[in-house]
Amino acid sequence: MGKVRKVKYFTNEKKALISDENKKLYEKYLKSSIIKNKDVKETTYKVYQNYMDHFLVYLAEEWDNISLYGDEFMEDAVDIMEGFIGFCQETLLNNKKVINTKISTVSSFFLWSLKRGLIDRHPFDKKLERMKGASDEKIKDSYYLTEDQVEQINEGLLDEKKFDFQDRLIWSIALDSANRVGAISKLTVSSLDLENMVFENVREKRGKIVEVAFEDETKKLIEEWLEMRKEMDNLEIDSFFITRYGGNYRSMSYSSLQDRVRKIGKIVGIDDFYFHTIRKTKLNLLYEQTGNIDMVAEWANHESIETSKKHYIKPKSKAQLRREMRELIKKNKEEKKDNQDQ
């Protein structure tokens, strides 16, 4: 792969989007840290502050400046951090080592907050897996799956020695719906409208209520899953995805869902595979198939089509642009000749 282009993204205009509340919370932590180690005030802590600004701008743009100490952040932290990882990979083109440092920067703030008694738990420590192979500086060309890769995963999931039925369900629902993991993790049997092929009234980020839709093939899998659940002993739980522990069933956790998705990514040779990748893949494929960005943005639950354009549509390669321009030039010449002949 050629030289990676640098992305100038965090302008003063971007930083102005950060809420005063979140800015003050981090400044308090930074001041406390500098007091303990003034020697690195202009070096290490400058880097950390810059990386935290990256995270806070992302939080402002994608999560409406959700409060760092708020209940909603604590509940959706893993989803938020996975989205940030995807943002660093695909928008900023950061390598794994830089991304891990950014995650550690955010994590250090919460560790300090926990020690100070400002929060009662770390929102994502031990729940969010750091990126593996950080010493490898190569960035993948793309985290959008092709249609062939999607089909390869569909076939790979049929291997019952490596994957179970819920793996197929998770993949199928995530791909069909393009919803965030925050919504996928909250699916329940009672919210399922099988006839209209949708889960209704699912709570997503910041209390937003969304629908999680699926296609005919996934409907068949869900019907089969509902029948399988009837055969399970002591199954008295509404959660759609479940695990069994100590003889009892309980909701499948964020970390379990993520572990399953990472395992699914290995089918196509991607180790750092996330729900965000599935979401981007589906939205990009929808755009390629329909050409309708408004429809894609609505399916993604984006308030602005600009979000869809910037972060979820794969940029065209020069080779593809060349082909399209040649076809357009040829078409224009033919239309011009036809008009002259008339």
Image (cartoon, rainbow, N blue to C red):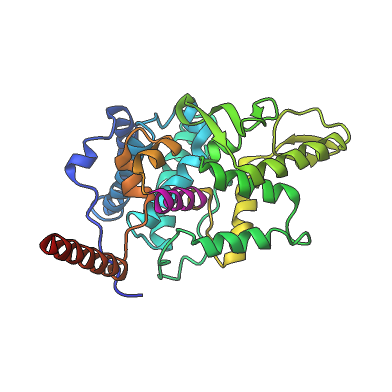
158 and 266: which one is in front? 158
126 left or right, relative to 134 = right
Q: In this view, does 215 lie above or below 8?
A: above
Q: Residue at x 40, y 49 (%)?
A: 287
282 and 43: which one is in front? 282
Q: Is residue 260 above or below residue 333?
A: above
Q: In this view, does 240 lie above or below 207?
A: below
Q: Residue at x 48, y 24 (%)?
A: 207
Does residue 243 show up? no
80 left or right, relative to 188 = left
Q: Which residue is drawn at 85% across and 34% down?
A: 230
Q: In which quarter of the image is residue 109?
A: top left
Q: Quarter of the image for the N terminus: give it.
A: bottom left
263 and 329: which one is in front? 329
Farthest residue in the left direction? 340
Q: Quadrant of residue 15?
A: top left
Residue 205, x across and y down, in percent: 47, 31
38 left or right, relative to 97 = left
Residue 167, x across and y down, in percent: 69, 50
268 left or right, relative to 53 = right
Which portion, as a residue range, is magenta? Answer: 278-290
In reply to whether residue 284 is colored magenta, the answer given is: yes
Residue 133, x across and y down, in percent: 50, 67
Q: How many marks?
A: 0
Farthest residue in the front direction? 342
Residue 149, x across and y down, in percent: 55, 63
What secondary structure is the stretch in magenta mostly built from?
helix
Does residue 296 show up? yes
Q: Quadrant of residue 22?
A: top left
